[in-house]
Image (cartoon, rainbow, N blue to C red):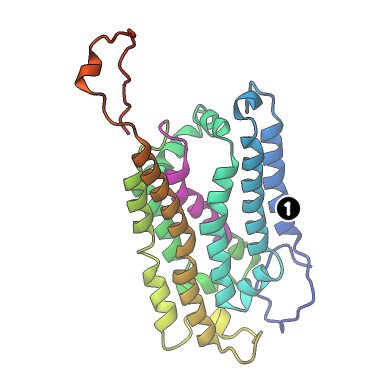
């Protein structure tokens, strides 16, 4: 029994294996979240103000934890750690692009706002909310964790595999934070800028995806020399599948968020009341004050 998924060089079997390190990590996340929701109202969530939305937050956070568990535990985590580059890419998509927005949606807004009051945590959250920093950090993590020499060196040990997985998770949280953080206290981008930011985030992955898809030979010794899980799938074909998954499937969560923001923006634009007529500025017979239309 090993604590984390790692390359072993053994022939792959579909016999279940236990990875207590994964269970511990997921359990600590769940325990932290449970404790956060169970804190007294004066220290965390005012239940009278959030009402049924707490249930929605819990559902989102559970989805995020399940994505992390699926990406790290057997069999996906084990396959991606030392057998198939394509499964390694699936773990990347789950950890960096699917789990982070679910986790952010799962943290109640009141908890996020109270985090901004903590002297040590507030500067980090405010820095991560800057689009240029978030996009830059995520892409640095993306490129570094796909360099062949780095991947082969880190994936040879459990600690190295853990560092890559945590890097993807942290990078994903930073990537989504400028879009999904509390506004206007932290996030100041308007919806058109959020859509531009999300579109920009889909461009850098084209580079590693193209290398994986169009390389004439396997780039990673870890997966080239690994025992074949499926004899009909060569190491190069597995690498090509990984490149296609990174771009075609990896962009789906981003475009889904893009669509949600766009349609909400369009709906609010069509339901905005027209500016008040000049005559309404005069005192009417009913003596009502003119309605002030807030700028969107």
Is residue 155 shown above or below 255? below
Q: Residue at x 53, y 50 (%)?
A: 101
- Which residue, as the protein is rendered here, is positioned at the far bottom? 232
Residues rendered magenta in the picture: 163-184
What residue sits 49% from the left and 54% below the top? 172
Q: Which residue is mark 1?
A: 24
Which structural element holds mark 1? helix
Magenta stretch, main secondary structure, is: helix
Magenta span has 142? no
Rendered image quadrant of residue 4: bottom right
Relative height, residue 225 to residue 204 (above, below): below
Mark count: 1
Callout 1 environment at 10 Å: few (<14), some (14 to 19), or many (20+)?
few
In front of the other: 235 or 63: 63
Does 99 sit left or right of 148 as displayed? right
Task: Say which of 188 and 5 sits in front.
Answer: 188
173 is higher (above) or lower (below) than 80: above
Residue 26 left/right relative to 271 = right
Could you tell me residue 268's position as x and y percent?
38, 39
Q: Nearer the viewer, residue 138 or 213?
A: 213
Q: Using residue 151 as the reference point, say whether residue 258 is left or right of it.
A: left
- Location of residue 223 in the rendering, given as x and y in whole percent from the top left corner: 57, 81
């Amino acid at each position: 029994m090993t604590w984390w998924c790692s390359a072993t060089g053994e022939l792959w079997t579909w016999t279940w294996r236990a990875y207590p390190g994964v269970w511990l990590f997921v359990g600590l996340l769940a325990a932290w979240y449970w404790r956060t929701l169970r804190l007294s109202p004066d220290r965390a969530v005012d239940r009278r103000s959030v009402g049924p939305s707490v249930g929605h937050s819990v559902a989102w956070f559970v989805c995020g934890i399940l994505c992390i568990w699926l990406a790290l535990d057997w069999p996906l985590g084990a396959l991606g750690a030392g057998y198939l580059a394509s499964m390694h890419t699936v773990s990347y998509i789950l950890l960096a692009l699917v789990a982070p927005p679910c986790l952010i949606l799962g943290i109640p807004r009141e908890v996020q706002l109270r985090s901004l009051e903590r002297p040590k945590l507030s500067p980090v959250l405010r820095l991560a909310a800057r689009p240029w920093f978030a996009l830059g950090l995520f892409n640095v993590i993306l490129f570094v964790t796909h360099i062949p020499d780095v991947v082969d060196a880190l994936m040879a040990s459990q600690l190295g595999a853990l560092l890559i997985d945590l890097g993807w998770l942290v990078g994903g949280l930073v990537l989504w934070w400028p879009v999904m953080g509390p506004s206007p206290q932290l996030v100041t981008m308007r919806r058109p800028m959020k859509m531009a930011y999300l579109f920009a985030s889909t461009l850098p992955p084209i580079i590693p995806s193209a290398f994986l898809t169009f390389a004439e030979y396997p780039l990673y010794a870890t997966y080239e020399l690994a025992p074949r899980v499926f004899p009909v799938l060569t190491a190069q074909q597995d690498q090509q599948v990984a490149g296609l998954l990174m771009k075609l499937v990896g962009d789906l969560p981003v475009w889904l968020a893009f669509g949600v923001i766009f349609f909400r923006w369009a709906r609010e634009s069509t339901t905005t009341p027209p500016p008040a007529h000049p005559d309404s500025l005069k005192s009417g017979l009913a003596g009502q004050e003119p309605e002030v239309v807030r700028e969107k």
